[in-house]
Structure formats: structure tokens, C-alpha cells
Amino acid sequence: MGRYALQRLLGVIPLLFIVSVLVFLFIHLIPGDPARLIAGKDATLEEIHGIQEQLGLNLPLWKQYINYMGDLLSGNLGNSIRSGIPVTDMLESRIMPTLWLTFLSMAWALVIGLLIGVISAVYRNKWPDHLGTLTAISGMSIPGFWLGLVLIQIFSVELGWFPTGGVDSWKSYILPSITLGMGIMSMLARYSRSSMLETLREDYIRTGRAKGLREYVVISRHALRNSLIQVVTVAGLQFGFLLGGSVMVETVFSIPGLGRLLVDSILFRDYTVIQALLLLFSTQFILINLIVDLLYGVLNPKIRFSQ
Amino acid sequence: MSDNSAVMGTNSPIPGEVIAPEKTKGRAGVFIRKFSKQKMPLLAAFFVILLFLIAIFGPFLTPYNPDEPNYDALMQGPSGAHWAGTDEYGRDILSRLIDGTRLTLAVSLSSVLIAGVLGTILGLVSGYYGGWLDRIIMRGSDVLFSFPDLLLAIGIVAILGPGLSNVVIAVAVFGTPSFARIIRSVTLSAKETLFVEAARSMGAKNRRIIWRHIFPETVPSIIVNLSMKIGGAILAAASLSFLGMGAKPTEPDWGAMLSMGRDYLSIAPHIVYFPGLAIFLTVLAFNLVGDGLRDALDPKMKN
Amino acid sequence: MTQNLLEVQGLKTEFKRGDGSITAVAGVDFVIKKGEVLGLVGESGCGKSVTSLSIMRLLKDTPGRISGGSVRFEGTDLTKVSDKEMRQIRGNEMAMIFQEPMTSLNPVLKIGLQLMEPIMLHLGYGRKKAREHAIHMLRLVGIPRAEELVDEYPHQLSGGMRQRVMIAMAMSCHPKLLIADEPTTALDVTIQAQILDLMKHLKEEQDMGMLLITHDLGVVAELCDRVVVMYAGRVVEEASVHELFARPQHPYTKGLIQSVPKLRQNVRRLDSIKGNVPDLSQMPAGCKFAPRCDFVMERCLSQEPELLPIEGLERKSRCWFTQQENTEGGERL
């Protein structure tokens, strides 16, 4: 296990490096001079030079990268071009709604997805399976922003059960979580179905039946536990999907989270904020994948006990 | 099937010449039989064909001029005159949906095709040559994979600026790595099969081996993956348009229509309902067709 | 009647394939007496494993189902009992071990728990007592450091050790009948001998009946009292072990015995019998072995012989040629 963990940890380092380089280069990839973009259309040449000086944009690229990384590691992500507020402050105030949203979405998606998948597999090619499969493929095909708007129209506008947006109470999170989790739920349902079907064909399932165990026990104790490892792994790997989706859902439900911040920043060309968010999202994604890998190691005795 | 090819290979002087067409012919027959057995995908396939017909003959089908405002009929609900109602400028929503079909299909198909061509070439090269080339391509796709799909697309649009052509590029970029990976693994296994060995020992050039012997093997996977990706591409493109990073509000893009209708959700929800339904049904149809193709063509990919 | 532990009569199992179905087991009859070891022998694909799964009613998750006949276990027809009653018999009075020890244990559960499952279920023991019993069973099958092993996972064990665990599991509720489907096939030759010794020893100690399914006549000679030879889903010959090896009747059995030296080295192909087992969906009309038989007659091609007792002997054969020979002159045996 120790070696496995170390391997995973070391494997992440080059990935993080490349991502940091790409994100750093982001500002240079935008067509046009970054300093001019930052200064705005009406800026004088002097102002532009001032910004170049201030941001170190006149230095060679590798030096800029080192400065950038130095700032990054000391917790300085620069200031917003638009508002001048330190980017870290902006992120801090925006992070909680997004965390809640993704966490809640994943939680229900995992539980329901797994349930649908297992039922589908157990009743393979019977009506529960057809229903489950159709639900899953519909959930994958539904545009999240549309689902969100339809939910708002029905449950907020017509019925008045939930607020139309914002983050005033726990109620505010219900509709957004349903919206955001739908895609993942469908994917997990499909995945756990096929994983369960595969597991149910294993020899040890037959052994369980040959012992005289009830079908319920065979499925829950022997099959589910094996499938669960794979399903949780896949669920973790889909966190990135949620981060992407949060952009959409936060826009639809006016949630002041990171995703909404990204959209606004892009629309206002607030490049320092975009840069910071891209970095945050991708590191988060990489780290989650790392955690999932490690978790997989903990759940799987073959890895846990290997030296 | 493998028995078949082995036998034919020994009989014909140039194995590939005979095997490739024979194999695809047999496959096509099996495929059509298997695919038409599945009810939902078959139904979905008809829907997709219908969509293409609408895309081609769109201008002849629209009951109204999709771009002409009518200030006497603002935000009217569905009626006999306007089946899907009118939008905030009094434009006929059904006409705009029909008109937008072409745009939706063009954007999604072109981005998926670009991803397919790039990914296939990278996968073939990576799988066939191996070595450092393989490592570079696979590491590259790992890096792309380490960005969430939609965020990658948003990032690309942020760099290139909004607009449909940039949406196509963005969607193509995030679709490429998965193609490359799948084609690479098919290439690896195809490389090991008998007739490639035979072709190589007869002194065939690498490029010829890839094109005549390995590429045909990857075709089912390419088709399946193409069809499975279209739905996602439509969703991604619509999402970007919805966020104001894709189509301009004036264009009859389904995502953009939805985005505009958002402001009138409480008074005229049909402006949001119909474009969303159009996206949903289209994506669903493509996904069902993709599933059906996968089950019929490539049962190994099922999991 | 009471002497028979298991009576299989006209057992028929069909598998759905595409639109039609194929018959994997086509009317199999045999009897296992109390404490007797019956060998079920044949090439792969002859239906012997399906027969055993049908007896245990473990065809769930396969496209197969029992379509006829009866399986009487101590007088009760297992094809008629409810699922619940069947579960009370499985793993309890009737246990089974499988060919693949490497995959027959659940990789994510501790060995102890897997052993304790049937014990707690059938013997009604609590956790502690079940654990002790599990350890006792592991010792019984010759596993050293049984106390530690119960807290380990299957991947830490070798194939031979895992098969011992499987045997311990099957024996834990003192079954009256043990079905062993190729228990040694997947193991190394030296381990095979150890496992066979163990099974022989346990069988004598526990006085249980055993259905041993194998393609290996060496295993049969070592362990069995009586043998049933299967071909293409049918019983073609039945005899005591001595009779069978001394005077095989059916041409197929003769071929099998002639290829014994090769079988000892775990070669599955029967090179001394020409041709292959026929595809179950394309069976010849008459005797199913006719296309490969050296003694084939005209009658064999059109009419299938029945499994008939051979006069004056405790044995049966399904062959026109031997039946004809025997009626013409039994002394030629």
C-alpha cells in the first residue's frame, strides 16, 4: 500500500507541473498583448508600460513563470483586473456554495445511480431494467440548464416550493443539486449496471449461491461490495464533470459560486480571475483523482496488502 | 470470423486485398440484423434521419420566416397559428427550431468529425509505432483529460473569444483524447493479429499496413465512438451558447434561444420549453443510436 | 429406495441460444448410493458440468433451464421444491466445489467470513462458534496456521490452498452429498495428488456420497466406486470402476481409456479418438458418437440406441454394436 500510494503521489507531480505551465501560458495564448488587454482600450502607452512593469510581463517567459509560481506558492494570485480585489479573496467568498452544490449532487447521484444500476442488473432484460436504462439515457441527454429552468418554472414559479435562486437556505440547494447530479446519476447507473452484471458472472457469486445464501445476501454482500469499489472510483473521476456542470447550474440558479464567477470573468475578460479559476479547477480535479486512486487502494485488499 | 480470415489469407496472394472487403461485408450483414432488432435505437435512428431531412429541407418547411419579428404576436403561447408559440420578438418558435436544426447538426457533426479524424490519426500512430511517439501522445491526452470537459471548452473559448466556430474547435479539442485512446487500444490488438504479421513479413510499408490492415479494424470503434460523441457535442455546444459564449443571440441556435427565453420564464415558459425539448430529444436520439451501434458493432466496448 | 442418496432420472437441460434452444443435457439417468463415489466422465462440452449445476439448481444467470426429468435427493424431487427449500439443501446437505479455486472465493471478503457464512446459515451458530468451527474445518483440510488464515484475503493463498479452503467450506455443514466439478484440473500435478488424497480421506471419515465430475480417468481410478460416461449430453456407459477399466463396452469409453497416459499429463484433447465432439446444435441423427466411431454400422446412423443394462452384469451401455454382440454371444465379453 505504501509503495502504491507513493507511486500515485509521484505520478501527480508532473501533471500538476504541466497544468501550471498551461495555465500560466493561458494569459499569453490570448491573441493580443496581455498588458493592453488588462489596461483596457483607452489606456495610454505609458499606462500599458506601467502594467507590463508591474506584472513583470517584460521579463523572459521562464522568469515570468518562476515569479508566477513563487506568487502562487505564497498564496498570491494577483488582483482582479475588473475590480482590483485580490483574487484569493474572491475565491474564498465563492468557494462554499460550489462545494455544497457539488457534494450534494454527488451524494444523491451516487446513491440513486447505484440503486438503479443494481436493480437493472439484477432484473436484467426485464421491465425494471428497461425502465432503468431509459431513465439513465434520458438523464444523460437532458441539457442541464434546461432541466434547471424547467424545475424553476414548475417548483419555484408555479408551486412556490423552492426559491428561484440564491443561497439563502438549504432549500436553495435542492433544485440545483437535482439539476447538477442528473448527468452523473445517469452515468453511474449505467456504469454500476454493467459492473454488477460483470460481477454477477464471477465464480464466487456461484459459490455464494452454492452455499445456500439468499439471493439478497449474494447480491449485497458478495456482488455489491466488489462493484462498489469500481463505482466509487468512477464516481470520483466524474467530479470534474460536476465542476464543469456547476458553471451552468450556478448561472441558471444565480448561485454566487466559483462556476458563476468563471462565467462572469470570461464575459468581462477578467483574465487574472479566469487564470486562477482554471488553475483551481484543474488542480482540484487532479487531487480528487489522486484521492480516488488512494481510496481504491484502501478498498481493494489486493492493493492494500501488497508490498 | 477469425477462422475465415486465416483461411482466406493463406489462399490469396495478398491477404489484405481479399480479407478486408469480405470481412466488412459479413460484418455489415450481422450489424444490420443486430441493430434492427433493438426497438429504441431503431426508432431513434428514424428520428435522426428525420432531423437530417429537416436540416436539408428546412427553408421549405418553416411556416413563417424564422427571423421576421411580429410585434402583434409577442410571446404568445402555443396555438393553431403558432404551434410552438412565439418569442419575445413575436418570431415563430417552430420556424426558428426548424431553421436551427441545420446549425445544431453542423456544429456538433463538424466538431465530432474533427475530433474523430485527429483522434484516429493520433491513436493509429501511437498504437502502431509505440515508443516515444506513443508516450508523448498519451501523456498529452492525459493532460487534456486532467481538465474537466466543459471547463476545457470554456477555457478555449475564453482564449479564442466567443462564436460558433470557436465552439467547434473547443468541442473538437476535448473530444480528441478519448478517440486517440480507444483507437490506440484497437490498433494495439490489431497489430498482433496474424494477417498484419503476414503483411509485414511480405515487406509491406508501415503506412500501407496501417491504412489497409489496421484502419479497417478500427472502423467499428470509430463509428461507435463518433455516434456516442455527437450527443455530448450538441449538449456542450448548446451549453456554451446558453452561457453566451457560442452562437450570437440573433442566430436561431437552440441553446441561444433558450438563453434568451430565460428572462421570460415566469410569463412565457414555452420559449424555454420548446428549444430545450428539441435539444433533449435530439441528444437522446443520438445517444440511443450510439448505444445501439455499440451493441451491434462492438460488444466488447459495452463496459 | 432408501439406499439411494441421489436419483437422477431423464434429466434434460436446455439453453436458449438466439431464437431457438439447444439441449446440453438430454435425458441423463444415474443413481448415487449412500456413501458412494460416482464419477461422471467425459470430454469438455459433453454436459457433465451442466448436469451438476442442474442438480444444484445453479443455472441462474445462465440462459439454461431444466426442461424435464427429476432429481431425487433422499426421495425429494429437487426440480419441484421451492427456491427457499432448495437454499436450505444447498451448502448444507448437498455441497459443491468448483474447478476454479482462484476465482471461486470472493476477493474482497476475509476467508473466515466466507467460511462462516454457510455455518451460521445452516448450523445456526453464532459468530464466535462459527469462527471456531471454520478454524476447525481449515485444520481438517490440512491448512497450517488456520487461526491466522481466517483473517486473511484469498489472494494471499496459492491455488492448492484455496481449493482446500473451498473443500473446507463445502464440508463445513457435513453434507450427505458432495459434488466436485473438476476439483483438481486447475492445479499442479503434485497438488492434485494431495487434494485427491484429502478428498478420499474426508470422504471415508464423513461417510458422504460424492459426485466427482472429471475428464481425467486417473482421478476416477483413484477415487470412484462407479463411473458414468457421458457423451453429447447423454450417458453412454455406466459400470463399476473395475469393470469399466477392465472391460470397457462402449467404443467411446474404449477410446477414452486408450488415451489415459496422455490424460495424466493434463492433456484435454483425446487424440486417440478421431474427430471432435459434435456441436450441440448440429447433432447427428442416430447415435451421437457414430461419426467418430470405429465400429459404426448402418443402424447407428439412423437410429439412436438406448441405454440398456447388459445381461448378467451391473452395468449399462448405449451402443448397437455391444448390444448386438451381447445378444449374439455374451461369452465374447
Image (cartoon, grey):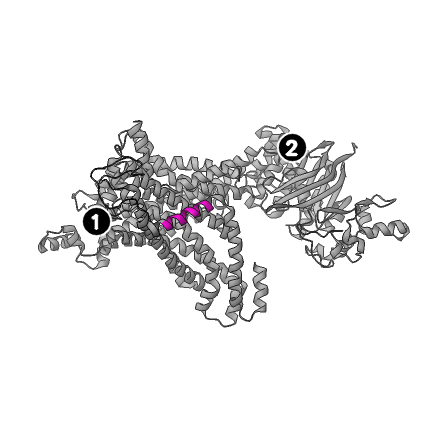
**Badge 1 amino acid:** Tyr
Look at 72% across and 52% down and name the residue there. Answer: C284
Mark 2, secondary structure of its residue? helix
Position of residue C239 measured from the top left corner of the image (x, y, whole percent): 80, 46
Residue denoted by label 1: A271
Range shown magenta: B42-53
Q: Nearer the viewer, residue C149 or C272?
A: C272
Position of residue B142 measured from the top left corner of the image (x, y, whole percent): 37, 53
Q: Quadrant of residue C105?
A: top right
Circle 2/circle 1 CB separation < 8 Å = no
* Vertical relation: C266 (above or below) A197: below
**Badge 2 amino acid:** Met
Q: Main secondary structure of the magenta part?
A: helix
Q: Marks 2/1: CA distance?
A: 69 Å
Q: Nearer the viewer, residue C264 or A82?
A: A82
Residue B44: in magenta span? yes
* Chain of the residue displaying label 2: C
Residue B10 falls left or right of residue C249: left
Tell me the crowding category of disc 2: few under 14, some 14 to 19, or many 20 or more residues within 10 angstroms, Cα based.
some
Residue denoted by label 2: C86
Residues flagged by tags 2 and 1 on a common chain: no
